[in-house]
Amino acid sequence: MRAIISLLLLSLLGAVMPALAQNAPASDHPILGIWRLEVPDTNCSETYRFRADGTTLVTSAAEISESVYTIPNEPDPEGFYRLTDRITKDNGKPDCSGNVMKPGANVTHFVRFHPSGKLFLLCAEASIEACIGPFTRVRGEEI
């Protein structure tokens, strides 16, 4: 019986792992790492940890959330990356804006990196007219 269960688990892992790897960004993608946003007109900051496995960990005020994301390996001709994100876990506490995220929520943003690779804007559409930021790369902290 244990052998059958072990085989079933291995086959499930075999089916899931390629799907996870397929959604993961390239190992040299500029989004990977830790980014911080100082929220204007507040004493609050948000920290985004974009992991190589296609997941994030976000802290914002009392909120701690996790999500899965997809992002193409190359920007569109205007320099924007389409970032899709789905919340998988949230501690139910308010973020810097006072909002509480709900698991299952999906959002699409557009990311535009500064040529230095040390900053990016997060935009509601593929235009710098509808953005927040800059997000600043945090060095010296491990993911």
Image: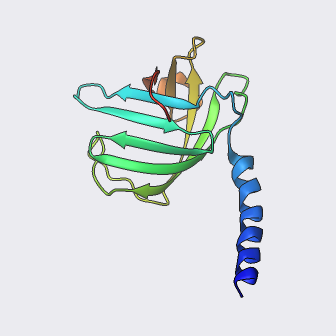
Question: Between residues 103 and 13, which one lies in front from this camera angle?
Answer: 13
Q: Residue furthest bottom?
A: 1
Question: Between residues 28 and 72, which one lies in front from this camera angle?
Answer: 28
Against 51, residue 90 (above or below) is below
Against 37, residue 82 (above or below) is below
80 lies left or right of 42: right
Residue 26 is situated, as x and y percent measured from the top left of the image, at 71, 34
Instruction: Please name the residue shown 29% across and 25% down the image.
Output: 40
Count up the numbered dots. Answer: 0
Instruction: Please name the residue shown 33% across and 40% down the image.
Output: 60
Residue 107 is situated, as x and y percent measured from the top left of the image, at 52, 48
Based on the displayed image, in which of its 4 quarters is residue 112 positioned? Answer: top right
14 lies left or right of 25: right
Based on the displayed image, in which of its 4 quarters is residue 82 positioned? Answer: top right
What color scheme is it? rainbow
Residue 71 is situated, as x and y percent measured from the top left of the image, at 65, 38
Q: Residue furthest top?
A: 116
130 lies left or right of 20: left
| Quadrant of the snapshot with the N terminus | bottom right
Q: Residue furthest front?
A: 2
Instruction: Please name the residue shown 29% across and 41% down the image.
Output: 97
69 lies left or right of 2: left
Against 107, residue 42 (above or below) is above
Instruction: Please name the residue shown 28% across and 39% down the image.
Output: 96
Residue 99 is situated, as x and y percent measured from the top left of the image, at 31, 49
